[in-house]
Image (spheres, rainbow, N blue to C red):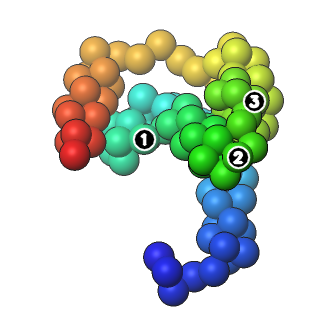
Amino acid sequence: MDVFDDAVQAAAFRRLVAHLQARTDVQNVDLMAVGGFCRNCLGDWLAEAAAAAGTPVDKAAAREAVYGMPQATWKARFQGEASAEQLAAMAASVAKNAH
């Protein structure tokens, strides 16, 4: 990633966040099943990066930045019940994250 400067990477990150905020039809469990990460992960990574940069942000605030609203509000509006199949696919995908 060294080929891209911080401004370019930040712009791509903002576009990813905007895309995820617009795609409320895509459940976190499905993101986890396919990509091994979800909105929560992205918010947590944001909080971890802020802490590493010397500007701690709590995970709830970082997740709110990713969701575009408090996580609980997003869950109430958009999150459905995960099926057994979705949960199994998520578990199999998350197992690939061990590195």
Q: Amino acid at mark 3?
A: Ala
Location of mark 1 (residue): 37
Circle 1/circle 2 CB separation < 8 Å: no
Q: Amino acid at mark 1?
A: Phe
Q: Is residue 77 above or below residue 52?
A: above
> Dot 1, how many residues are within 10 Å of its Cα: few (below 14), some (14-19), or many (20+)?
some
Mark nearer the N terminus (1 vs 2): 1
Using the image as rendered, state which of residue 89 and residue 53 is in the foreground: 53
Q: Amino acid at mark 2?
A: Gly
Residue furthest front as drawn: 54
Q: Position of residue 36 (x, y in %)?
A: 35, 42
Q: Position of residue 96 (x, y in %)?
A: 20, 42
What kind of element bears circle 3?
helix
Separation (CA) of disc 3 from disc 2? 16 Å
Circle 3/circle 2 CB separation < 8 Å: no
Q: Is residue 16 left or right of residue 69?
A: left
Mark whose residue sits in front, 1 or 3: 3
Mark nearer the N terminus (1 vs 3): 1
Separation (CA) of disc 1 from disc 3? 18 Å
Location of mark 3 (residue): 61
Using the image as rendered, state which of residue 4 and residue 26 is in the foreground: 4
Location of mark 2 (residue): 54
Q: In percent of the image, x 72 and y 75: which residue is there?
A: 7
| Residue 30 falls in image quadrant | top left
Asked whether residue 51 appears in the rendered view, the answer is yes
Q: Position of residue 8 (x, y in %)?
A: 67, 77
